[in-house]
C-alpha cells in the first residue's frame, strides 16, 4: 500500500518535494483505525504534518479504508524495527539522512562541501549589476514604487516604509527595483543586505533543517540590516516556511531592520498566506507597479536602444511598443534580439527587418481579439449602437468612436487596412488609415481621450 501511496504522492507533489520530505517516512504499526508513520526528526515530523498531514490521511484511507487516521511520530534511532502493514515491507531506501535536497544539489557548486558551510557561505543571492536605479526607466505606472524604493535605499527602516511591499505582474520591474535598493545600499557600504527569492529562502531553510543548523540560519538572517525576499507568493501553501519567515520578519522589524518584499499581488489579495503575515506585510508601505503604458514602453525602449549603441528608428520602437504590451521583460527580449541581429549582420534596423527577425515573437503577441469584439466594446463605451460601426452616419458622436474602433483594430489585430475597412461597412483602406492617424493625433492633444482609448485597449487585451 505504502509504495502505491508513494507513487501517488510523487506525482502530486513532484519529485523534488517528495524526495526532500516524504521519502523519509517509514511506516509503523496500525492500531485499530490509526496508522503510525515515522520521521527521523521532530522538525521533519512537524513539517510533514503541516504540509502533507491531511493528504496522507486521505491517501491511506483510500488505499486501506479501515485506516481513518494517520499519526506522525518521531522515530528514535534505537527504536525497534517497525512493523509492516499487510504484506508490504517499508520502502527499503528510506532514511535519507545523507541525501541532500535535490534542488540544492543542482546548484552550481555541486558536491561534497559540508552542508553547514553551504548554508553559511552564500546566504544571499548575488545582485545583478545591470539592475540599478540608473537603468530603471520611470513612468506613471511605476513612479510610486520607484520613489518608495529610492527612499528605502536612502534611509532604510524609516517609519512608514518598513516593510516595503512591492507588487505587480510578471516582468514589470520588481526584481530590478529590489536589486537597485541592494546595490545602492552596498555602494554606501554601511549596511549588510541579504536578497533572495522566497524559493531560495525555502531551500536554504530546508538545507538548514537537514544539516541541523537552523539556529545558524536564523542567526544569519537576523543579523542583516536589510532583508529582501522576492516573489513571496511562492510561500503560498508552504506553511512551515511561512512560519519561519514570519518569525524572521518579526525579529528583524522589531530590531529596527528593514524588510523589502515583492509579490505578484497585494498583501490582501495573497490568499493562502497566513492572515497574521498578510497583516504585517501590509503595515508599512505597499506600492504597486502597474502594467506599462505605451509611453513607458517607448521610454524603456529608447533607453535600452541608446545604451546598446545601435540606431533603432522611432518607427520600430513604436511598432514594438504597440505590439508587445505584456511586460518589460518580453519587450526587452525583442529589442535585444533586434540589436543582436543588427550587430551580427551589420545591417540597419528597419521595420521590415524587425517584422522578419521577430516573426515568432510578434505572432505570439498577436491579440486574438476580433474586430467584432472591438466594435462591441467601443460602442458600449461611448454608448452608441453597434450597427453604427458600419453605418454611413457621419455625426461626430458616431464617427469618433468608429475611428477609435478602427484604430484599435489596427493596433490589436493583424488584419490589413482593407480587411479592417470591410468590417466597417465596406469602407476604403484610406479611411482606416485616416482614422488611425486622426486618433493618434487626438490622443496626443487630449489626455482624457487618450486615457479612454488606453482603457479600451487594456480591456480588450486582458
Ligand atoms: P519582475 O521581477 O517584476 O518580474 P524584473 O524586475 O525581472 O520583473 O524585470 C524584467 C526585465 O525588465 C528586467 O530585465 C528589468 O531590467 C526590465 N525592466 C522592468 N521594468 C523596467 C524599467 N522601468 N526600466 C528599465 N528596465 C525595466
Ligand atoms: Mg522578479
Image (spheres, rainbow, N blue to C red):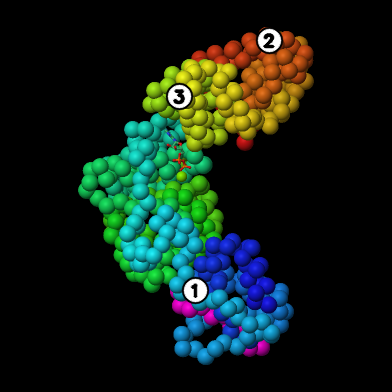
Which residue is painted at 63% across and 33% down in the image? 364
Quadrant the N terminus occupies? bottom right
Between 313 and 152, the one lying in front of the other is 313
Which residue is painted at 68% across and 30% down in the image? 369
From mark 3 to mark 1, how far is it between C-alphas?
52 Å
Packing grade of label 2 (10 A; few <14, some 14-19, many >=20) is some
Query: Circle 1 — which element?
Result: loop
Q: Give the number of the mark in front: 2 or 1.
A: 1
Q: Which residue is mark 3?
A: 343
Q: Quadrant of residue 216?
A: bottom left
Which residue is painted at 59% across and 16% down in the image? 439
Quadrant the C terminus occupies? top right
Q: Give the number of the mark in front: 3 or 2.
A: 3
Q: Position of residue 9 (x, y in %)?
A: 62, 67
Residue 217 makes an appearance in the image: no
Bounds of the magenta span? Answer: 31-46
Q: Is residue 416 magenta?
A: no
From mark 2 to mark 1, how far is it between C-alphas?
72 Å
Query: Circle 2 — which element?
Result: helix
Q: Is 59 placed left or right of 150 in the picture? A: right
Marks 2/1 in contact by CB < 8 Å: the verdict is no
Q: Which residue is mark 2?
A: 431
Query: Circle 3 — which element?
Result: helix
From mark 3 to mark 2, how far is it between C-alphas?
39 Å
Q: Earlier in the sequence, mark 2 or mark 1?
A: 1
Q: Is residue 388 above or below residue 394?
A: below
Q: Is residue 32 magenta?
A: yes
Amino acid at each position: 500500500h505504502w509504495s502505491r501511496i508513494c507513487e501517488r504522492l510523487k506525482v502530486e507533489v513532484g519529485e523534488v518535494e517528495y524526495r526532500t520530505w516524504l521519502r523519509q517516512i517509514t511506516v509503523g504499526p496500525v492500531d485499530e483505525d490509526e496508522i503510525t508513520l515515522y520521521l527521523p526528526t521532530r522538525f521533519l515530523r512537524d513539517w510533514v504534518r503541516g504540509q502533507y498531514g491531511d493528504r496522507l490521511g486521505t491517501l491511506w484511507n483510500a488505499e486501506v479504508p479501515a485506516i481513518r487516521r494517520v499519526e506522525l511520530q518521531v522515530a528514535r534511532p534505537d527504536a525497534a524495527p517497525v512493523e509492516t502493514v499487510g504484506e508490504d515491507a517499508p520502502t527499503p531506501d528510506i532514511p535519507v539522512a545523507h541525501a541532500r535536497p535535490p534542488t540544492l544539489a543542482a546548484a552550481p557548486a555541486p558536491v561534497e562541501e559540508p552542508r553547514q558551510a553551504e548554508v553559511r557561505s552564500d546566504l544571499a543571492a548575488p545582485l545583478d549589476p545591470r539592475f540599478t536605479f540608473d537603468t530603471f526607466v520611470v513612468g506613471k505606472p511605476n513612479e510610486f514604487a520607484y520613489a518608495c524604493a529610492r527612499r528605502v535605499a536612502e534611509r532604510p527602516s524609516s517609519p512608514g516604509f518598513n516593510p516595503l511591499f512591492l507588487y505587480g505582474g510578471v516582468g514589470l520591474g520588481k526584481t530590478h527595483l529590489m536589486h537597485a535598493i541592494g546595490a545602492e545600499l552596498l555602494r554606501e557600504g554601511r549596511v549588510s543586505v541579504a536578497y533572495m527569492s522566497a524559493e531560495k529562502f525555502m531551500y536554504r531553510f530546508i538545507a538548514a533543517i537537514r544539516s541541523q543548523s537552523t539556529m545558524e540560519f536564523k542567526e544569519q538572517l537576523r543579523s542583516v540590516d536589510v532583508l529582501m525576499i522576492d516573489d513571496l507568493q511562492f510561500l503560498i501553501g508552504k506553511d512551515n516556511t511561512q512560519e519561519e519567515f514570519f518569525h524572521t520578519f518579526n525579529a528583524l522589524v522589531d530590531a529596527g531592520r528593514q524588510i523589502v518584499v515583492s509579490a505578484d499581488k497585494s498583501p490582501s489579495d495573497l490568499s493562502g498566506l497566513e492572515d497574521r503575515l498578510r497583516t504585517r506585510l501590509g503595515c508599512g508601505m505597499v506600492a504597486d507597479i502597474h502594467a506599462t503604458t505605451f509611453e513607458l514602453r517607448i521610454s524603456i525602449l529608447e533607453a535600452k536602444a541608446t545604451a546598446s549603441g545601435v540606431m533603432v528608428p522611432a518607427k520600430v520602437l513604436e511598432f514594438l511598443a504597440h505590439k508587445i504590451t505584456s511586460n518589460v521583460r518580453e519587450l526587452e527580449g525583442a529589442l535585444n534580439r533586434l540589436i543582436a541581429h543588427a550587430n551580427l549582420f551589420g545591417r540597419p534596423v528597419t521595420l521590415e527587418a524587425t517584422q522578419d527577425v521577430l516573426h515568432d515573437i510578434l505572432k505570439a503577441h498577436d491579440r486574438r481579439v476580433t474586430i467584432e469584439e472591438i466594435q462591441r466594446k467601443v460602442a458600449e463605451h461611448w454608448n452608441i449602437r453597434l450597427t453604427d460601426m458600419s453605418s454611413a452616419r457621419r455625426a461626430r458622436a458616431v464617427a469618433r468612436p468608429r475611428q477609435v474602433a478602427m484604430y484599435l483594430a489596427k493596433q490589436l489585430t493583424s488584419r490589413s487596412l482593407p480587411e479592417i475597412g470591410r468590417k466597417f461597412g465596406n469602407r476604403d483602406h484610406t479611411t482606416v488609415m485616416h482614422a488611425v492617424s486622426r486618433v493618434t493625433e487626438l490622443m496626443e492633444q487630449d489626455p482624457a481621450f487618450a486615457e479612454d482609448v488606453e482603457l479600451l485597449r487594456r480591456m480588450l487585451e486582458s
